[in-house]
Image: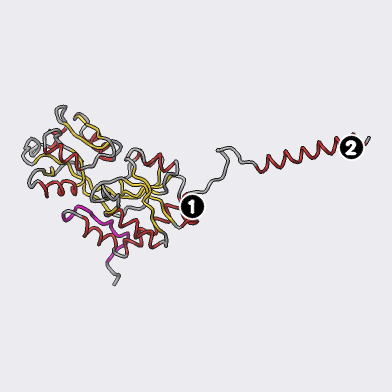
Amino acid sequence: MRTVYILIAAVAAAAMTALWVLHNQPQSGSTVATNTAFERIMQTGVIRCGYTAWDPMLKVDPTTKEVSGLAHDVMEAAAKYLDLKVEWTEEVGWGEFNQALQNQRFDVFCAGGTPNGERAKVTLTTLPFVYTDFGVIVRADDTRFDANAQRLNQPDIRFGQLDGTTAVKIIRDGFPAAKLKGYPETIPLSQMAIDIATGKLDASLIPITVMHLYNQQHPGALKRLEGVGANRNLPNVFFVSRHEPQLKHLLDTAITEVLDAGVVYRSIKQHQTAVGAYLLPAKPYQPEPIR
């Protein structure tokens, strides 16, 4: 009888141990509770930024890897208003940052990119902090398109653009018959200016700032085509994972404060290459006082 009691006690102890292990062991990846980027930032006081260089919106020194530019200034100021610090963690390509956010390699994509429908499927965007003037750029001595911009939409016309960018979608929509040469995502946008000037491309849709920087070194080399539907003032935003609404709200609030404080205005004055290259968002209220 004593042996029976011992066996019952042993079975009960084993069952209790099994229940304890089952309750306390890590669960499967589909149910385990992981910290969000927002929670991590609140715990560490640090925003980890991913970024892509596109001068002058965001510049990376090739030697020191120091980051600067308009998007850098805005993010650093936003973090200061939130009593946080910024760590410029990783340089990635335009087509790569969506997945990098999902994999939590960094918390925010801080390059000041432009939103589009494809990116909206997997990311959330902050409020725009500035608008960038994008224009169709051709060689200054190329007169084929001056009287007829639709001449661009022909099979013999060669456009170029970085893969994974909003500009690719605009070019394909606006000039579907033209050839489109894709460039690796990490190539600087200035390469498009070089290839247009040297005849390797006929046109590209790039920020006017890029054309201005090239023309400073090669006066009169490139021009912007006016009256072309593809010319746009595109919003610049920061991106977070689609699972981070609290982080988006946090950044939206800080961006509003930074805009109201004139930080973006002063950074535009420092970084724009010509008047109108960057535009401030419109005020969401009537500026005239009620009398």
Residue highlighted by disc 2: 5
Query: At x 48% / y 56%, what residue is drawn?
Result: 42
Compared with residue 78, is residue 205 higher up or lower down, i.e. above or below? above
Q: CA distance from mark 1 to mark 2?
A: 51 Å
Q: Residues within 10 Å of mark 2 (few under 14, many from 20)?
A: few
Q: Position of residue 188 (x, y in %)?
A: 23, 42
The amino acid beneath tag 1 is: Arg
Is the C-beta separation of discs 1 and 2 under 8 Å? no
Query: At x 47% / y 56%, what residue is drawn?
Result: 44
Q: Secondary structure at mark 1?
A: helix
Horizontal side of 282 relative to 149 (left or right) equals right
Q: Position of residue 56 (x, y in %)?
A: 23, 51
Query: What span is colored magenta in the figure?
Result: 274-287
Query: At x 16% / y 27%, what residue is drawn?
Result: 155
Residue highlighted by disc 1: 40
Towards the viewer: 25 or 209: 25
Magenta: main secondary structure: loop
Q: Position of residue 225 (x, y in %)?
A: 13, 42
Q: Position of residue 109 (x, y in %)?
A: 36, 47
Q: Secondary structure at mark 2?
A: helix
Name the outermost residue toward the front: 63
